[in-house]
Every structure is written in structure tokens, then in C-alpha cells.
Image: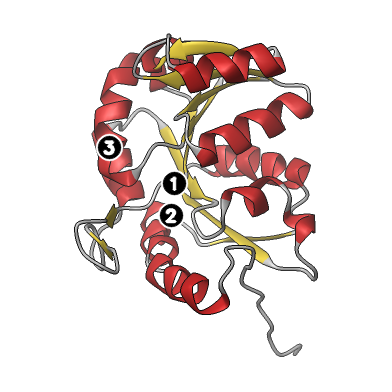
Amino acid sequence: MRYGVLGTGMVGQALARRLRELGHEVAMGAREASNEKARAFAAETGGQAMDFAGAAAFGEVIIHATSGAHALEALNQAGAENLAGKVLIDISNALDFSQKPPVLSVVNTDSLGETIQRAFPQARVVKTLCTVNAKVMVDPGRLPGEHVVFLSGNDNGAKKDVRDLLTSFGWTAIIDLGGIEGARAQEMMMPMWLRLWGHLGTPDFNWMLTRRAD
């Protein structure tokens, strides 16, 4: 499978490198193909370094891993024509870092996942992995127990593809929250996640769900 990973930060690097380990073709996209982090990824892994549009055109599946504040800018540079019909995995959170602690800039009646789906109606947007840190995203086994990851999206076929990808990473407890509006619930977990990080002193944690067996 060919993946276009948009974003060269910690999340984009972790996902792109894990995908290469699993044998996928990967292009890492940045504002410019000459981006040093993207070029280093390509040199180290045998992947490719491209600009956003090139990576989006290359990928059969697109992973959006830029910051929430720059999401629409990055995706517009990627090009609606390069996203149309493709699974677009959105991992970003709409965090406003001008305040301390950061707050969500889109919340309650909307989400960044929904915003992206509206802006690119021909893309098949699936929200997932935004409730854990980058290392846990690609290696859930680094934490004990059956901890959970969520996904949301309007296209059932796209969600199946994303579920298969998560399973290949090692996830076993995957909870489907329904349509893309379920992204609101996922994104609203971020303030709690940040508070727990401060309390625990480590980002290596996740949520576990227990329920009564009837």
C-alpha cells in the first residue's frame, strides 16, 4: 500500500517509520520537498520526501499529521483533487497554544475532523489515534493491558481500512464511535489527556474501558 504522510513532526515521523517497517511505500509530505526532516526520513528508511501535494498524489491512503492549527492550510496545499476518493486519516487536535493550559479552538458543536470533512467532501475522512502519544500510536504493546483506541467516520469502507491498519500496528481494542461527528468526543479527550500528562509526568499512558458483562 502507498501512504502519503502529511507532517514531519513527532507524529508524522512515528507513523511513517512504522509504515515502512511494515513494508508499505511511504512519502512524507512537507511544505517543501527539501524539508530536512522529510529528507532525513527518506535517507534513513528508503521512503520518499515530497511536498504536501506530491505526497497526497502519491498516497493511496493519506495520513494528516500536521498540527490542528495548520490542518486546513496543509490540506489545501495537498490539493482537493489529490484527496478525492481516498481514505484521509486525521490525527490532529484543534489545540490553541496561545493559552496555558492549551484549550480547544473547535469544540462541543463541531470538531476538527468534521471541519476537514466539510472542507474536502470527496475525501473519506476517518478520525483516530488523537487520544494517545506518538509512540503508543504505533506500538500499543508498550503499555500493559487491553487499552483502547477510537475511530469515527461517515464511510464504513474507510473505517474498515483504518481498523485493518490499526490492527497491523497491534491494536486489539478498537471502538467505532459512529459518524465523523464522533470526532468531537475524541478531540474533547485532549484537555484531560494533557492534565494527566502533567500529573503522571509521562505521556506513556492510555485509556482502558471496563463494562458490566450482561
x then y, percent, for residue 126: 48, 44
Depth check, mark 1 against mark 3: the one in front is: 3
Splitting the image into 4 quarters, where does residue 1 fall?
top right
Q: What residue is pinned by disc 2?
A: 179
Q: At 22% from the left edge and 58% from the top edge, which residue is drawn?
A: 105
| Residue 162 vs residue 154, the one in the foreground | 162
Asked if 71 appears above or below 208 in the picture, the reply is: above
Secondary structure at numbered mark 3: helix
Q: At 71% from the left edge and 41% from the top edge, which residue is drawn?
A: 164
Asked if 173 appears above or below 93 in the picture, the reply is: below
Asked if 185 appears above or below 45 in the picture, the reply is: below
x then y, percent, for residue 39: 54, 13
Q: How crowded is mark 2: few (under 14 residues within 10 Å), some or many (20 or more)?
A: some
Splitting the image into 4 quarters, where does residue 48 fall?
top right
Secondary structure at numbered mark 1: loop
Marks 3 and 2, how far apart at CA:
23 Å
Q: At 36% from the left edge and 13% from the top edge, which residue is drawn?
A: 32
Horizontally, is 106 left or right of 75 in the view? Answer: left
> Which of the labelled discs sits on residue 70, or is there none?
3
Marks 1 and 3, how far apart at CA:
23 Å
Amino acid type at mark 2: Gly
Amino acid type at mark 3: His
Q: What residue is pinned by disc 1?
A: 154
Q: Residues within 10 Å of mark 1 (few under 14, many from 20)?
A: some
| Residue 157 vs residue 54, the one in the foreground | 54
The disc, 1 or 3, on the residue closer to the chain's N-terminal end is 3
